[in-house]
Amino acid sequence: MRTINVYKVVLGVAGLFLLAGCSTAGASAAGDAAPASTEGSTQYPFTTTSCDMEVVVESAPQRIVTLEQTATETLFALGLADRMVGTAYLTDPILEEFEQEYASIPVLADLYPAQEVVLEARPDFIYTFGPGSLSADSGGTRESYQSLGVPTYLQAHACGVEGEAVSFDGYHDEVLELGKIFDVQEASETFVAGQRTRVEEAVAEPIPHAEDISFAWWYAVTDTPYLGTEISDAGNVADLLGVTNAFDDGGPGAGHRHRGRYSPTATPMCSCSQISAAAERAIRQLQRSSF
């Protein structure tokens, strides 16, 4: 397969999503938050909504547990490593700039820890990617934690309505709300401003003949690959670059549903031959072998 400069550009824009974890367009990570901050300082209790569940934070969390890598790295980016008491589920090599922080946090499990393991860390807040990490089969249900007075917060992309696209803007909204939850508004605003600048710089130079270029976003798994479609982060990158996502309509396997309320067409299963036939110029492959 022939690769051209678009590959480098796709990698540059796509790399931002490794930390972002993706969020739905125009939505906060939880929904509509109650106005509870003034002049950059959160006034508690802070109330918001996360995947249809009300979340009430009585004070700035000091003992945070994250159950998936994207949530972990997001909090590292906000300077919250010293408040984290547990993490889990590493799907990719940890970002180099966060290796020291990651080494300082107890790893509760290779995948999702059992609820009793989570509770042993005495968390006062749990932040994770999707509903699969907080269920009766893994990690304990959100309702059970709520009954114990431990708020749980899920990233918006994993609990968005079917067919709703993801975007950098959605992730930025989520990070800004996290800044209010943890009372680190300045850090969240600085981080979002930097991310927006990176996106602008990555797409500043138009790609020659972009309309003739197609690519595939190899999201996860090697034996039966999962590909990003138009409503996934791949679609957002394609729009930003003006290129074509070869699997924007879902393609073979589009009915697959892999995570909670995540859209069934976001990451369809495809064969390697289908990928090479559809993507003429470039393939973006994440380093993960699982979700």
Image (tube, rainbow, N blue to C red):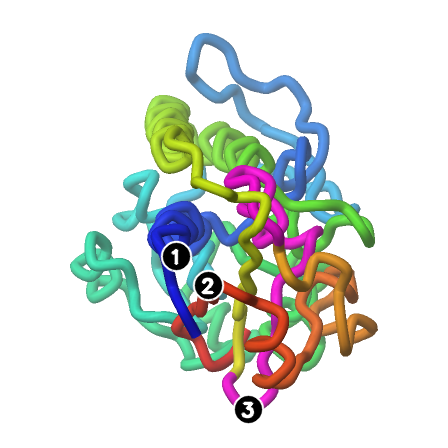
- Residue at 64% from the left image edge and 18% from the top image edge: 35
Residue 121: horizontal and vertical position, in percent?
Answer: 41, 66
Q: Which of marks 3 and 1 is in front?
A: 1
Query: Which image quarter: residue 279?
Result: bottom right
Query: Which image quarter: residue 250?
Result: bottom right
Lateral position of residue 201 relative to residue 68, left or right:
left
Q: Earlier in the sequence, mark 3 or mark 1?
A: 1
Q: Which residue lies furthest to the bottom in this view?
A: 223
Q: Does the magenta stretch include residue 233?
A: yes
What is the number of the mark on residue 282?
A: 2
Q: Earlier in the sequence, mark 3 or mark 2?
A: 3
Disc 1: which residue? 7
- Residue at 63% from the left image edge and 70% from the top image edge: 278
Residue type for callout 1: Tyr
* In-front residue for pair 175/211: 211
Q: Which of marks 1 and 2 is nearer the N terminus?
A: 1
Lateral position of residue 90 relative to residue 218, left or right:
left
Residue 189: horizontal and vertical position, in percent?
Answer: 40, 24
Q: What stretch is highlighted in magenta?
A: 222-244
- As measured in the structure, the alpha-carbon distance from the residue carrying label 1 to the one carrying label 2 is 5 Å
